Image (spheres, grey):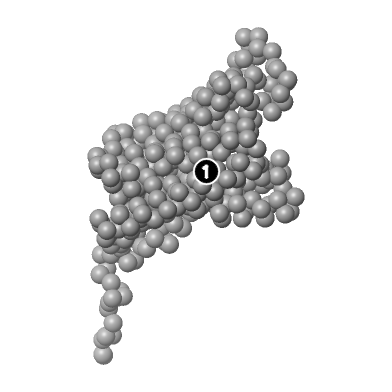
Amino acid sequence: MIGSPYGPYNPYFDPSLYMMAQDEKRQLKRTSNALCWMLIASTVFLYAISIVGRVYLNAVGYTADYTNPDFHGFTPVLYYLLNGVTYSAGLAIPAFLYLSIFRIPPAEVLPFQKNGFLKTGACVLFGVAVCMLANIPASIISNIENMFGFDTDLSMPLTDDPAVLVLFFITIAVAPPIVEELIFRGIVLQSLRKFGDGFAIVGSALLFGLFHGNLVQIVFAFIAGLVMALVDVRTDSLLPSILIHFCNNAISFVLTVVQRLYGETTMGYVNNVVFGAAVLLGIGSLVYLWAKDRNFFQGGAVNPVFRTPEKIKTLFLNFGGIVLLIYAFLSSVYTLTQ
């Protein structure tokens, strides 16, 4: 009897790679499921805290003020105070619970390594440029939705009261960069890095996009999430992404105020100047980062049996991932119909 010339496994791969891949897949599924449930819990907490706030105000005798219906019965100052507190607490509480349940030291997922002014500054300028460019596909999606009669205006109500403008600035340019970066480039990105930096960058960006729950912001947040995750991985610090996020949202604040005070035409001029300057500075920063580190934009070695596309599928093929996808879809549909 002549024996088979072939072994019991693919001769091109070490069999240990398959066993490692299966173990890695199980770990990734558990980690992904937990992260997705943390994000789902955040959306639940956002609504719950908002409802509790309304109930409390009614209980203490607050009378709804519908002088300006855009503020949903609140005074403008109270509206932004509640928004800021609700958003920060709604995201922070589930994140704290996640770290507590899995006994993860904050320092393990919240890196702040020193990188020097030039490298950090170059990362920030490069990231802001990518965010500016990310507005292009987001605007295309918005225009397509408008063509079909959907209202894609997601702007928040505003008045000329200085106190309201300050609270508006804090609500969009201060709180989100801190809270969202600690969660998405902190807990989410760092938790996924043990499965490969390239996958962690793409996976965290996908979760960041889906969390925003509407088509326009999903596209923008995914692209912005990619660059913010990249610079954080390369610097091992959350500071660059916090600053990128702050600059992007601060630019949005300035454009909103300019439009309100000086009109659409002036806002368009300011936007073009900011866009052009950001892109030019971003190109210069890109060249600087590449010259200082030729590996800055290159990925590392991966298990050839468990590649990034397969990891992305595993990221969502779990109960939490499926629920998050359903939430993103329903939220996107709901946003279009409002």
Q: Position of residue 16 (x, y in %)?
A: 25, 64
For the C terminus, give its image quadrant: top right
Q: Is residue 133 above or below residue 112?
A: below
Could you tell me which residue is drawn at 30 percent across and 63 percent down? 303
Could you tell me which residue is drawn at 66 percent across and 45 percent down? 152
Q: Position of residue 297 (x, y in %)?
A: 33, 58
> Closer to the camera, 240 or 208?
240
* Helix, strand or loop under label 1: helix
The residue singled out by tag 1 in the image is 211
Q: Position of residue 7 (x, y in %)?
A: 27, 78
Q: Quadrant of residue 64?
A: top right
> Closer to the camera, 19 or 238?
238
Is 306 on the left-hand or right-hand side of 260? left
> Closer to the camera, 296 or 55?
296
Q: Position of residue 301 (x, y in %)?
A: 28, 62
Amino acid type at image mark 1: Phe
Residue pushed farthest bottom? 1
